[in-house]
Amino acid sequence: MQKRTPLEAWSCRVCRALHWLRGSTTHSRSLNRAPCDHPGVPLTRLLALLAVLLLAAPAWAADPPTLLVDASWPKPLPHGWVLGEVSGIATDERDHVWIIQRSSLGPAAAPPVIEFDPEGRVVQGWGGPGQGYDWVANGHGIHVDSDGFIWIAGNGTADGQVLKFSRNGKFVLQIGHPGIAVDSGDVTKLSRPTDMQVDPVARELYVADGYGNHRVIVFDADTGAYKRQWGAYGSRPTDRRITYDPKAAPARQFGNPVHCVKLSHDGLVYVCDRKNDRIQVFRHDGGFVAEWFIKPATRGLGSVWDLAFSPDPAQSFLYNADGINDEVRILRRADGVVVGTFGHPGRRPGEFHWVHSIAVDSHGDVFTTEVDKANRVQKFAPVLSTR
């Protein structure tokens, strides 16, 4: 492939940003691809596109997006594949969507890991036991890092590991190992981890650990070496069991599960303390920054299941998937205030039953997954404001 000139590379970035602002339509997708596939785009066209981008940006920065379900996504699965619980979802730098799912229907079972292209067509599927690693008993979270490696976590009873693969399923690294034990002081093993994300600058892996332990733990993303860990408020994690009471003082430790960990562009770490109905925010060193309680009257499994950032440069909004109240909230990231919602309980397109995980691509398309026999992935596309 011929190397792009700096102007051509810049034009691709402009058009991708414009596409996100315009919303997900066939026409805007063709705009997104044109500069990359057809070198030598006239400078006048690029400047016109940039002008539209700059004029549209303030509206997106000020207002939360309106999203509509795209019931045509994904396309029918090949080979008669049937999904089980779809527990995790991620997007990559090509705007491909990756899921991890739990089908166990014999020959009809879909592979544990499936990659979709932006139009919802299956690209590949892989996963399962293999030589040199311990496959997870119950897949839970999936992450694609900036180098294209696929990370997987499992919350099975004995799952104590996260796994790293190439995008075509070749094993690369295992951190931790299986075993039935809860010990938030043990830095060699996890306890039913749920989620993970790589900091591409420091090359560190942040793990939400988990259904057994009560911590965020950080490893070297290349070697697996332990770096640091912390519990709620940046304190030393303990294994004391916590029962959430919305009328009591906030718990000084994470409950179970610690259900997600997400890294923003500006150096903050967002943690889903699911049963305690809260998001806690930290610096990369574990220093506590803030906490936000989300629908704090929610009992049982809690209200903070997963998080994802809007794709604008400032990541102005934070999406919160809530599998008990079956809705997705849009929070203003600056202060955690809820500024919008979409979805409600049900099984039809655009509704949710145990919405479990959430991801956003570079265009602002939002993808969700569901468990507890709902067993599906949905896409919600942004609608451009006309005001």
Image (spheres, rainbow, N blue to C red):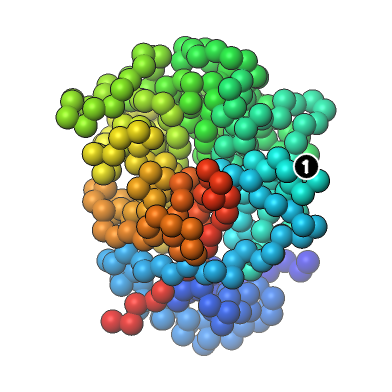
Where does residue 141 sit, x and y in percent of width and height? 56, 39
Question: Where does residue 83 sit, x and y in percent of width and height?
Answer: 66, 50
In this view, the residue in front, 31 or 256, is: 256
What residue sits right under mark 1 in the picture? 106
Q: Is residue 132 left or right of residue 34?
A: right
Rendered location of residue 174, percent (x, y): 68, 27
Q: How many marks?
A: 1
For residue 271, what is the image quadrant? top left
Quadrant of the image containing the N terminus: bottom right
Residue 105 visible in the current orientation: yes
Instruction: Residue at 41%, 74% (x, y): give it.
Output: 383
Q: Position of residue 336 (x, y in %)?
A: 26, 48
Which quadrant holds the C terminus? bottom left
Residue 305 lies in quadrant:
top left
User: 56 left or right of 33?
Assistant: left
Q: Between residues 318 and 282, which one lies in front from this camera angle? A: 318
**In the image, residue 278 above or below residue 124:** above
Task: Say which of 59 and 177 sits in front.
Answer: 177
**Rendered residue at 68%/43% (across/down):** 103
Q: Is residue 102 above or below residue 376?
A: above
Q: Secondary structure at mark 1?
A: helix
| Label 1 environment density (alpha carbons within 10 Å; few <14, some 14–19, many ≥20) | few
Q: Residue at x 33, y 56 (%)?
A: 330
User: In this orientation, does residue 225 appear?
Assistant: no
Q: Up-down: is 30 above or below 325?
A: below
Q: Which image quarter: residue 160?
A: top right
Residue type, mark 1 in image: Gly
